[in-house]
Image: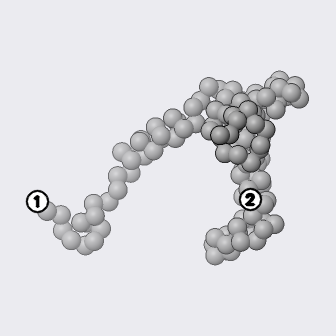
Amino acid sequence: MTDPHDDDASRPADLPALQRRLAEFAAARNWQPYHTPKNLVAALAVEAAELQEIFQWLTPEESARVMGDPDTAHRVTDEVADVLAYLLQFCEVLGVDPLAALAEKIDRNEHRFPAPDPERSSGTPPRS
């Protein structure tokens, strides 16, 4: 059985555990004064732009194969990690549960954008 306090960074963790690790990392470096919502959302935008930069001039086909190149795949995973880290820190500072927020947003979008009627999308008229 895996020790939950093991420092193995490669092990999967849940979001609250990752948020705790990020908070502990920042606290150990006395970075909390800089982790304001404004600063964190700005850092999030910068990291998202760095992820976008990797794909900037790729064709759709090239972008679909980006993980096939080990160097580029490493850059993508690093930027994804940076984006997620800043998003989780932002959520922690503001008290937002990111999974609950996502579930609620999906629920709203399912009502706003209902799936097409399968009978209509197949060209068959709807039944009365």
Number of marks in the image? 2
Please tell me which residue is depicted at 25% across the width and 73% down the height of the picture.
123
Label 2 near label 1: C-beta < 8 Å? no
**Crowd band around label 1 with a 10 angstrom C-alpha radius: few (<14), some (14–19), many (20+):** few
Q: Which mark is residue 76?
A: 2
Q: Is residue 10 visible?
A: yes
Q: Residue at x 62, y 25 (%)?
A: 95
Q: Nearer the viewer, mark 1 or mark 2?
A: 2
Q: Which mark is residue 128?
A: 1
The C terminus sits in image quarter: bottom left
- Observer-nearest residue: 57 or 70? 70
40 versus 68 height, above or below: above
Where residue 79 sits: x, y (%)? 76, 53
Q: Is residue 22 left or right of residue 99?
A: right
Identified by mark 2, the residue type is: Val
For image coordinates 57% across by 31% down, the residue present is 97
The amino acid pointed to by label 1 is Ser
Disc nearer the start of the sequence (1/2)? 2
Taking depth in this image into account, of 26 and 96 the one nearest to the observer is 26
Q: Position of residue 60 (x, y in %)?
A: 63, 72
